[in-house]
Amino acid sequence: MPIPEFVSELRSKVGQSPLWMAGVTAVVLDEQRRVLLGRRSDTGRWALITGIIDPGEQPADAAARECQEETGVHAVPERLTSVTVSPPIVHANGDQAQYLELTFLCRAVGGEARVNDDESVEVGWFDPDALPEGFDERARQRLQIALSGAAEAYFSFDATAAESAAADDRAGQSLRTT
């Protein structure tokens, strides 16, 4: 997989230390509501269309760009469906990263699904109920969220930590007033 120039520049300074990166995932549907997947050249596994957001690039633009670059399909992002964080990843070259994952539900509007760069060895449309074997479980969850029809984007929030901080604040205020 080609490494974006801005990441190469960062890596020249930080080596293989963990980098916090922003990425997009495009859940692209065709008119039959099939989902577009690519079989990754690095792992051999089928996956949703993903990529790194370029500096200054709008996330929805990045989702559309990655889709066209990787698969030849032109897609229009229709809504943000989830905001998640990947587990820490060690890439095949030893580089460490963790990704803020912005997932968009997209509509295919043109082009033809094909291997369009070296990031995939195969590209295809799949019924969401008949995904290929070995499809990543985290990607499956983001796909289910995208297809759920929920109007709002999914995100995780640790309410316990927020409630604990608020309780600490209240306790500190009562100590100052006594």
Image (cartoon, rainbow, N blue to C red):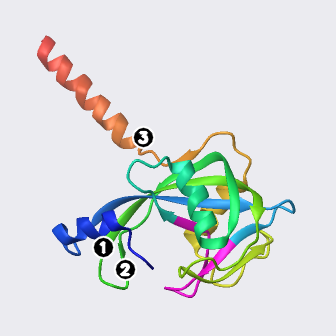
- Measure the C-alpha gap from mark 1 to mark 2: 6 Å
Query: Residue 177 lies in what quarter of the image?
Result: top left
x then y, percent, for residue 110? 77, 60
Q: Quadrant of the C terminus?
A: top left
Q: Earlier in the sequence, mark 1 or mark 3?
A: 1
Q: Which mark is residue 57?
A: none
What's the residue type where badge 3 is placed?
Ala
Q: Which residue is mark 2?
A: 91
Callout 2 secondary element: loop
**What SS does tag 1 mark?**
strand
The Cα atoms of the two marked residues, 3 and 2, are separated by 32 Å
With respect to residue 143, does 171 lie above or below?
Answer: above
Q: Mark 1 sits on what residue?
A: 96
Instruction: Give the residue pinned by disc 3.
Output: 159
Q: Marks 2 and 1: in contact by CB < 8 Å? A: yes
The amino acid at mark 2 is His
Which residue corresponds to the image point at 68% horizontal and 39% vertical from the top-left?
151
Image quadrant where residue 87 sits: bottom left
User: Magenta stretch: residue 39 in it?
Assistant: yes
